[in-house]
Amino acid sequence: EAGVVQSPRYKIIEKKQPVAFWCNPISGHNTLYWYRQNLGQGPELLIRYENEEAVDDSQLPKDRFSAERLKGVDSTLKIQPAELGDSAVYLCASSFDRDQPQHFGDGTRLSIL
Amino acid sequence: EDKVVQSPLSLVVHEGDTVTLNCSYEVTNFRSLLWYKQEKKAPTFLFMLTSSGIEKKSGRLSSILDKKELSSILNITATQTGDSAIYLCAGSSNTGKLIFGQGTTLQVKP
């Protein structure tokens, strides 16, 4: 079974530039999550999707972050404009449903100059 | 506010030692407790515990949940250098949201 696929693996941009991350979940997994992990910390949830519906986006900074999950499969997370404090690893995870374990992709390491 | 606290934050042992990692949680509408291993990439799923007092085992790793004490432990016996990693504990609510602890960094020396 193929795992969660994320791209790019690394991204370096200057502040105020836009950036986008892409995630392809495990086939058949209806629930998709985006997390942000700062150095030395555990991941923190940004947004959760059930199929194509965002059911929990309370921790997403909506002034600069947006996400979409078209057709209930792939998802993109966008930041515009990026700020220095956005430097982190952005992890995507998926699960069959909310009661099953979440499986993570390798993440995108974002560095803001 | 929901929170998960892990201890110790870091640990250095020698190959062959046994280690115990601790996790305490306060999660509204708690559903399950999960353990992940994180090396340089993605957190890798280890265990999910939903019932108190029932031990889950996988090789040299085992874990148990105590719902009365709102805690869990992860045991690793006969440690190997390949066990060196960050071990993350997370509490799951009934919405599926995971609240992670800050992790325990384990270093196993040859």
Image: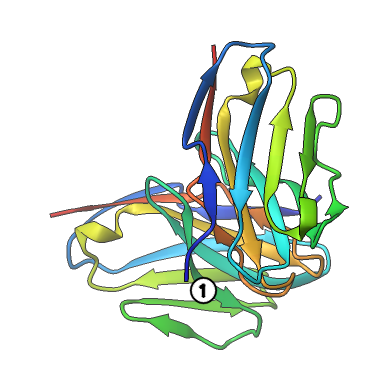
Left or right of B81? Residue B53 is right
- Residue in view at x 73 percent, y 17 percent: A81
Residue at the spot 47% in from the left edge and 37% down from the top edge: A9
Q: Between A8 and B72, which is closer to the camera in this rendering? A: A8
Relative placement, left or right, of B44 versus A81 is left
Q: Total label count? A: 1
Percent from the top left, x then y, of residue A57?
A: 84, 46
Q: Quadrant of residue B97 in the image?
A: bottom right
- The type of colouring in the image is rainbow
Quadrant housing the C terminus of chain B: bottom left
Q: Position of residue B52 (x, y in %)?
A: 64, 84
Q: Is residue A105 above or below residue A96?
A: above
In the rendered structure, the residue with mark 1 lies on which chain?
B
Q: Is residue A112 or residue B30 the one in the foreground?
A: A112
Q: Amino acid at mark 1?
A: Phe
Find residue B31 and report its horizontal and vertical position in percent: 74, 73
Neighbourhood count class around disc 1 (C-alpha, 10 Å): few under 14, some 14–19, many 20 upward: many
Q: Is residue A63 left or right of residue B72?
A: right
Q: Residue at x 47, y 48 (%)?
A: A106
Residue drawn at point x = 30 percent, y = 54 percent: B84
SS at badge 1: strand
Residue at which label 1 appears: B47
Q: How far across and down, in percent of the image, does residue A13 sit?
A: 56, 16
Q: Is residue A27 above or below residue B53?
A: above
The answer to whether A13 is drawn above or below residue A96 in the figure is above
